[in-house]
Image (cartoon, rainbow, N blue to C red):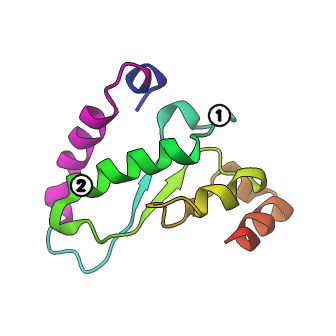
Amino acid sequence: ETLEERRGGRLDQVLRRQVAAVRPGLEGAHAFMIAYEPVWAIGTGETATPEDASEAHAVVRDALGDLGAAPVLYGGSVKPGNAQALMATPGVDGVLVGGASLDPDSFLAIARAA
């Protein structure tokens, strides 16, 4: 979701629409993961708070329905300084590392935070 959508209280609506669009392709899948990555956090250095991530992941799981046992990862400016808090958040099953994966020291610090 965009920052405007989140601030406008449309998180639930946006995420449910996105999950509904991909859900048919997931039916019958043996294993899959879902990554929640807010548009406003991609490459901006901004990241969701653990509470924001937990809220979004709960919506995704609910929208998945009987497919909701799949791991839901958080992606969006994951860094060594926020990885541990994000991974300790209820409903966050792991992280999707983007730009920080290009720096071996940063990536290693994130892996150690797990």
Q: CA distance from mark 2 to mark 1?
A: 26 Å
Residue at 73% across, 64% down: 110
* Residue 109 drawn above or below residue 11: below
- Residue 20, horizontal then vertical, whole percent: 18, 47
* Residue 63 drawn above or below residue 16: below
Disc 2 + disc 1, Cβ < 8 Å:
no
- Report which quarter residue 29 is drawn in: bottom left
Magenta residues, as a range?
7-26
**Is 107 in front, or is 11?**
11
**Is 94 in front, or is 50?**
50
* Amino acid, disc 1: Glu
The residue carrying pointer 1 sits among few (fewer than 14), some (14 to 19) or many (20 or more) residues within 10 Å by Cα, namely few
Q: In what quadrant of the picture does the N terminus appear?
A: top left
Q: Is residue 25 magenta?
A: yes
Q: Which residue is mark 1?
A: 46
**Is 34 in front, or is 88?**
88
- Which is more N-terminal, label 1 or label 2? 1
Residue at 28% across, 36% down: 12
* Residue 110 drawn above or below residue 13: below
* Amino acid, disc 2: Asp
- Report which quarter residue 113 is drawn in: bottom right
Residue at 29% across, 71% down: 69
The residue carrying pointer 2 sits among few (fewer than 14), some (14 to 19) or many (20 or more) residues within 10 Å by Cα, namely some
Determine which of the numbered discs, if any, sits on residue 62 in the image.
2
In screen coordinates, is 80 left or right of 17? right
